[in-house]
Amino acid sequence: MTTKKIIPIVSAADDQYTPYLSVMIMTLLEHLADNVAIIFYIIDDHISRESKEKLTQVISNHSSEIHYLEVDSELYAGVLESDHINQTAYYRISLPDLLEGKNYQKVLYIDCDVLVLDDVSVLYDTDIGENIIGAVIDPGQALVLDRLGIDTADYYFNSGLLLIDLANWRAAKITEKTLTFLEEEEDKIIYHDQDALNAILYERWFPLHPKWNVQTSLLFERHRPPTANYQKQYKEAIKQPSIVHFTGHDKPWNSNEYHPYNRLYLKELAKSPFHQ
């Protein structure tokens, strides 16, 4: 019997978001290579027993496990929230600490509000060198690091997908530094934990191909690519996305706004145990 390669994947959800988490899990498993098994770690913000039972149903026919992680929510008391970003979104900052002792070299973090259309084991195998994370540029915020008081030519990344080198993160004390920035530079924060992560991780992140995090603004070509190479990559990502990320206020489940992947998303959502 061939031993499958184990890949750890982390997401975070409260009970309200578990149906959308189920779509991420379902579509990820549908596109996964046969020689790979996933261990999902869900940062648990009061997910109900009933919802956990339904998530177990989602993985029942796959070589997969789900484990739940608890964060000290007091670390994030008073953080900036909005109508589509709540305190749960900040919990990824504590992720490397939560996986202490699990003996993983790296972990893949993925937001709930995505549709996976490709084999994430290929993404997981990306060599990010000595960088702390791999991430995808945020097309709408690419050139805003000066707003955070950062003097650099680096770009701003989207934190909805992060390939994290756990040892490098811990060694650089990224969790502690990010929490300090959230506390001491609150007046600079607009885009929540993403701002703080960019302020700490600039020049220490590896740019992944945009196809792995095709944000809504990228799909609609709302922003000019910063370089000719990014222009090429943006076109490739739009033509064949690997992960579609429904960023912003409008999600497939709450909006009639036209999005080319809304119909497919809702079709997948209808298959979920949460909608049966």
Image: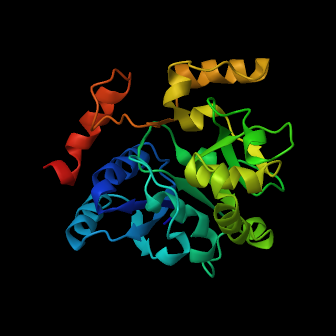
- In the drawing, does residue 195 fall left or right of residue 229? left
State the residue lying farthest toward the front.
187
**Percent x, y of residue 275:** 16, 48
The answer to whether 152 is drawn above or below residue 104 in the figure is above
State the residue lying farthest toward the bottom.
101
**Percent x, y of residue 233:** 68, 24
- In the drawing, does residue 274 fall left or right of residue 64? left
Residue 238 falls in which quadrant of the image? top right
- Residue occupying the point 50% across, 19% down: 220
What colouring style does the render use?
A: rainbow
**Percent x, y of residue 217:** 53, 26
Q: How many marks?
A: 0
* Residue 8 in sight in this render: no
The answer to whether 236 is drawn above or below residue 28 in the figure is above
Q: Nearer the viewer, residue 270 or 217?
A: 217
The answer to whether 112 is drawn above or below residue 39 in the figure is above
**Percent x, y of residue 167:** 75, 70
- In the drawing, does residue 236 fall left or right of residue 51? right
Residue 108 falls in which quadrant of the image? bottom right
- Residue occupying the point 23% across, 68% down: 53
* Residue 196 in sight in this render: yes
